[in-house]
Image (cartoon, rainbow, N blue to C red):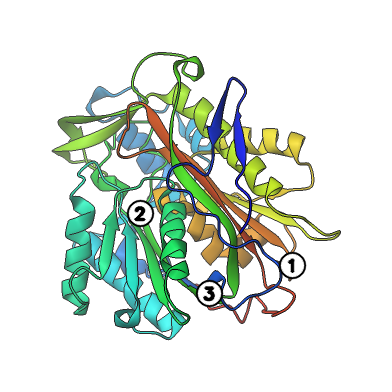
Amino acid sequence: MSRMTTVGFPSHQMNLVGSKGVAVGHFAGYESATPGISAVADVYDQDDLFDLLDNEEVLRLSHLGGANGFPGLPSIRKSTGIKHRRILRKGVTEVTLGVRLCERLEATAGIDLRDCDAILICHSHTDDDACRQLARAIEQELALPTDLITPFNHGCTGFLKLLQDASSEIDARPAGSRVAVLSIETPEFWHDAADRLFCGLVSAGAIGAILEHGGQMPLDRIAADDFTIPAEQRPNPDPLFRKEDTDVFCFRGEPCRRTVMRMNPEPVFINAIELMLSNLRAALDSFDRNEGERVIVLPHQPSAKLLKALVATGYQEFPDVEFLNNLAGYGNVISASVPTILSRLDEVLAQNKCAPIREGDHLILVAAGICMHDIADKMAAGFAHIRWAPIASPVSAEQLAVPQA
């Protein structure tokens, strides 16, 4: 087993393995018993599911109700780095999105989800029961066994937390076991379209992966948990996040009443960067790299401003590491942000002017953001290290079951 790693902020220490941490077997060539990802699928190419919001529409939304919105299009581009975001098309529900994802994942992996030992789903929401309702509805639509799907309301680090739980599930089961992990995010239903801290960023999406023994992308190390942000790391004493039940505007510009998430931007910004850097350091410290092997970082995609700060600091400390930016076409898809890059890795590498993925390259998935179960005082963070196409069992990017749009 790989060793635990403790890293910290400048003024305090945090154990990145945490209370729920699990260290997957350290990479030493391909092993059939090692949990790994064998298939990834998304539904972004299914245009009938989504409507797109461009920057002109975001500008309009941000001023609804007399709100202090964006001053203009250049401000939106600089702050968000996004060209368009997705919301569900009228008549499309979260259940529709989830069912389509399941069907795509089954087709991509060549399996029946009924044969999975477990299915884990992250669906973030201000209503803690929304994910459970979605899980039961998907089971009913697809005639899956009741309670085969275990729901979680995790927020931005949701995919990493699901991978961690799925890896533990696989480790505890005999060879041939299989677990599906699904991130289904529709943040338009729990945000205020006139709140400029979110309206230009959040975007709908859904992505799934299959984990099994001997998966072609072995999980070398994974750790994700929730962390208390101490007073000395908070420029003001206000809650990091808070819920508000109030009259707002939906993302079609219509007035409505809902429970929305509000953010305290300064401490969230500072600590999100520090948490991702701390997790990146832990990930890089967890494996040995041979000459010529690249390290490619797939970070959470919160905003252009935060991502730019992360990359600038990261390059100073790790000048030979490559950071990927996928904001322009996909936005902040909450827990689906990181796996979206993984699903469309060839596309994103090309957009970032990076060389294609090569056998032996290291992928580091890293995220930090809201802790949905203690929003006032905690943030969640985590990382995963994946070795692409191990030398002992070479697999090309084309052979891995990843669909292309």
Pick the residue in front: 262 or 210.
210
Task: Name the amino acid, label 1.
Answer: Gly
**Residue 391: quadrant of the picture:** bottom right
Q: What is the count of numbered marks?
A: 3
Q: Give the residue at mark 2.
A: 204
Q: How would you rate the neighbour count of disc 2 (Cα within 10 Å): few for under 14, some for 14-19, many for 20 or more?
A: many
Badge 2 marks a residue whose secondary structure is loop
Badge 3 marks a residue whose secondary structure is loop
Percent position of residue 223, x then y: 52, 49
What is the spatial separation of the Cα atoms under label 2 and label 1, in whole angstroms? Answer: 33 Å
What is the spatial separation of the Cα atoms under label 2 and label 3, in whole angstroms? Answer: 20 Å
Task: Name the amino acid, label 3.
Answer: Val
Q: Give the residue at mark 1.
A: 360
> In the image, what residue occupies the spot 66% across and 68% down?
388
Task: Name the amino acid, label 2.
Answer: Ala
Q: Earlier in the sequence, mark 2 or mark 3?
A: 2
Closer mark to the observer between disc 1 and disc 3: 1
**Residue 351: quadrant of the picture:** bottom right
Percent position of residue 349, x then y: 66, 60
What is the spatial separation of the Cα atoms under label 1 and label 3, in whole angstroms? Answer: 18 Å
> In the image, what residue occupies the spot 54% across and 40% down?
16
Measured along the vertical axis of the image, is residue 285 above or below residue 23?
A: above
